[in-house]
Amino acid sequence: MRIALDAMGGDHAPEQIVEGTFDFLREVPDQDITVVLVGHQDVLRETVRKYSFDPHRIHIVHASDTVAMDEKPARIVKTKPESSLVRAVKLVQSNEASGVISAGNTGALLSASLFLLKRIPGVRRPALCPFIPTPGGGFVLCDAGANVDVRASDLVQFAVMARAYSIHLFDHPQPRTGLLNIGTEPGKGNELTLKAHDLLAEHIPDFVGNVEPRDLFIGKADVVVCDGFVGNILVKFGEGLIKNLTEWAKEKLKRHPIALFSLPLMRPALKDLAHDMDHEEYGGWPLLGLNSVAIVCHGSSSAKAIKNALKTATRCVSENLINSIATGINAHLDISQEDHALATS
Amino acid sequence: MRIALDAMGGDHAPEQIVEGTFDFLREVPDQDITVVLVGHQDVLRETVRKYSFDPHRIHIVHASDTVAMDEKPARIVKTKPESSLVRAVKLVQSNEASGVISAGNTGALLSASLFLLKRIPGVRRPALCPFIPTPGGGFVLCDAGANVDVRASDLVQFAVMARAYSIHLFDHPQPRTGLLNIGTEPGKGNELTLKAHDLLAEHIPDFVGNVEPRDLFIGKADVVVCDGFVGNILVKFGEGLIKNLTEWAKEKLKRHPIALFSLPLMRPALKDLAHDMDHEEYGGWPLLGLNSVAIVCHGSSSAKAIKNALKTATRCVSENLINSIATGINAHLDISQEDHALATS
């Protein structure tokens, strides 16, 4: 199995990308797994030289260009064909790799993957599906930002895809699926969620109904579906709130010298907390619904995030997640077709 | 000026409602302001007896019934005409009070207010507008849950109304307005926000464009508009995250005895932080767009929240917020009509 890794994508590329690769190879000794680092060969050769490694497990594929974090993603395959990101996706397209990972421009990876890698037959909209850690154990959220305007039947597809991901990657044999909503009663919500609630109840096993934001923290569902606009707002708001609460607390501590002085005594507990909440432990955001494995990592990814994304990617491939998703989508093709007929009639 | 207060609404009614009323009357000695406590007269007479007060500043209006927190709000005026909540709203309808406050069933207060109190001419959808405290100073969010499906022109009306509220209640002479979105560039967002961005840019002074969730914390905007589904999810998620982070942190502390032992040293700083984040400091969620002042308080409201909601209500009345909103709405009637023509054509 070969995984293509955009070695030039992200705030800490290529150093942290390469370090994460070596950490992964040490922890996963399977000789059949190879990582293909895609990026400028001079830079990458220089970077990997610092490590001792088995040359059979690392390949370098040259790409002369890069995609900037703020670059317009829409036509990235045309505008940056020689970029490390596009070249990495093309390795999957040509079957030279089974999956692709990038911590670079998220929109560009979405755009290139949608354009170059085929969708699973019947999937209307591939969707992003991060794992969100919580005190209740965490859940996968789908869609977290790939589709900002969706139909009710799309939410059923998101549920099918995210359930398969939860079963394979998080060892939930029967994941409970919830619909993110502003109230728990079936009659609550907007046009989209009202319609989606009934479709999900009919078609998704172990559907637990509407989940309110507060339910997210107490483990009420293992899979939570929503449109990509709401999902993206939610994830970004959570990140921002945690970051700013921490800074807000620091400001307050500065005004109370005794509290500031005692902070080091807290450190082990705070470190524990930070570890449990650390999104880098959970291996990136898979883009579900494509015929291949594609994983988006946070721009700020360190070696740990890359190592865990590589673990996620190899597990998705070896457990044949794509096949499970295809089976699930195939069993529910009728809903999508009905909904499409309604929307276009 | 008389403010009608649903004395039986909320988890801590009537004790905390009555206590908040007396705290308010002590802090605001203006003899022209009277609070009308609406609820069962035997219960209320018994409760107010504990306090020494000027009988001219408190009235009790009898209501034999109450609205439960989980009651269906849709036809509450018909199903519970003798409830303290509906009676309180009716006092405004009959001009016996200038504003109404309830910490009871939010949906019921929305429903009764929309049904009994007239809308300001031209307002299509009244909207909830809480103040959200942040390290950057905070902002008002509109809509936080009254309208789950909206049009772009509704977001312009939300901006007009929330700006007036920000000018009057938070002393921002020129509040900056932002559109909640998943990216800052003008081309980002879903169908609704793409269209709303251009309308807001054209019609709202000091429009700062799209604001991402992370921008909310750094004071990029004083007024943030969004549809009520997203706004409600955001507020509830923030509440849930803060509550659960606190509990998560406590759990971690228990496993580190030294940290737990040093927690009291932190207390003054944590108390400072909790004070700044305390929504009870900010006097409830006004429902903007009605011809009268109506304020929703959190079900868990203590005396402090009630006291501050009374301050907000009296200030809205004395500064004639309704008039400012009416002037603003009137200046932008054309957008709403155009959008409506488009939607129905």
Image (cartoon, coloured by chain):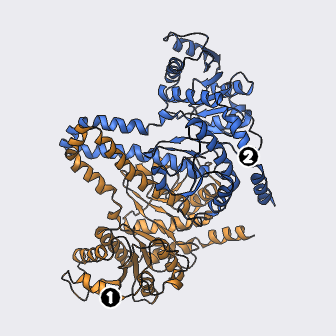
Chain colours: A orange, B blue
- In which chain is the residue bearing label 2? B
Q: Residues within 10 Å of mark 1 (few under 14, many from 20)?
A: some
Work out whether B48 lies above or below B176. above
Q: B183 or A320: which is nearer to us?
A: B183
Q: Is residue B319 visible?
A: yes
Q: In the image, what residue type sits under mark 1?
A: Gln
- In which chain is the residue bearing label 1? A
Q: Whole-percent x and y of residue A336?
A: 62, 70
For residue B115, which numbered disc appears in the image? Answer: none
Quarter of the figure that contains the C terminus of chain A = bottom right
Q: Which residue is mark 2?
A: B124
Work out whether B39 lies above or below B254. above
Quarter of the figure that contains the N terminus of chain A = bottom left
Q: In the image, what residue occupies the spot 72% across and 70% down?
A: A344
Q: Whole-percent x and y of residue B335?
A: 75, 54
Q: Residue furthest front?
A: B173
Does residue B181 appear to the left or right of A92 in the view shown?
right
SS under mark 2: loop
Does residue A321 appear to the left or right of A57 in the view shown?
right
Does residue A255 appear to the left or right of B160 in the view shown?
left
**Do tags 1 and 2 sit on the same chain?**
no
Q: In the image, what residue occupies the spot 53% across and 33% down?
A: B283
**Which of the 4 quarters of the picture holds residue A102?**
bottom left
Work out whether B167 lies above or below B332. above
Q: Is residue A1 visible?
A: no
Q: In the image, what residue type sits under mark 2?
A: Arg
Q: Residues within 10 Å of mark 2 (few under 14, many from 20)?
A: some
Q: Which residue is mark 1?
A: A41
Q: Whole-percent x and y of residue B303?
A: 48, 25
Work out whether A302 lies above or below A47. above
